Image (cartoon, helix red, strand yellow):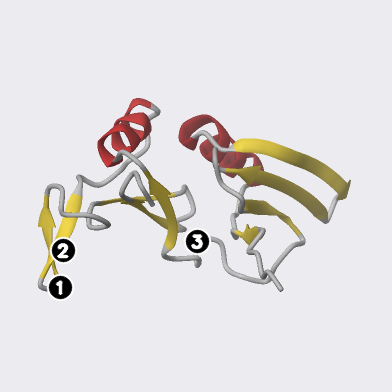
Amino acid sequence: MDWKLEVVVVPVSDVDRAKRFYSEQIGFVVDVDTQISEAFRVVQMTPPGSACSITIGTGLVAMTPGSLQGLQLVVDDIEAARQHLVERGVEVSKIVHYENGVQAEGRGGEWNSFIYFSDPDGNSWAVQERPASS
């Protein structure tokens, strides 16, 4: 039996602002934007190439906006990913890696190059470079 993670709910305070951030600045594809009632709206977006989507909205979860920390994306080219975010006005960290458990600036070896950013509510994301063959 396969167990596939399909959707992660991201708690936000302003759905339209978050939708613009994730779709226009980050580049996620908007799959669904439906409002069932004043108290219930679902916006589902998918990172290009991903089998897992995020959902933002109203009436979805009781989590505090900005409380989701450590979401992670993987990319083939960390430098291109960082440039993509910078060009779209996203505040993003420099490229870092880890040596003996300590963060250091610059690229690392395989699976050891990262950038970090947060959405307007403070939900935090890591972007990790994976080897091209993975």
The residue sitting at the top extreme is 87
The residue beneath circle 3 is 66
Q: Residue 101's quadrant in the figure?
A: bottom left
Q: Give the SS element for disc 1.
A: loop
Q: Are marks 2 and 1 in contact (CB under 8 Å)?
A: yes
Does residue 29 appear left or right of residue 104 in this picture? right
Badge 1 local density, few (<14 within 10 Å), some, or many (20+)? few
Mark 2 and mark 1: Cα distance apart in space: 6 Å
- Location of residue 114 with respect to 71 vertically, above or below: above
The residue beneath circle 1 is 101
The residue beneath circle 2 is 98
Identity, as a three-letter code, of the amino acid under mark 1: Gly
Q: Give the SS element for disc 2.
A: strand
Q: Position of residue 5 (x, y in %)?
A: 63, 64
Q: Position of residue 102 (x, y in %)?
A: 12, 69
Identity, as a three-letter code, of the amino acid under mark 3: Gly
Badge 3 local density, few (<14 within 10 Å), some, or many (20+)? some
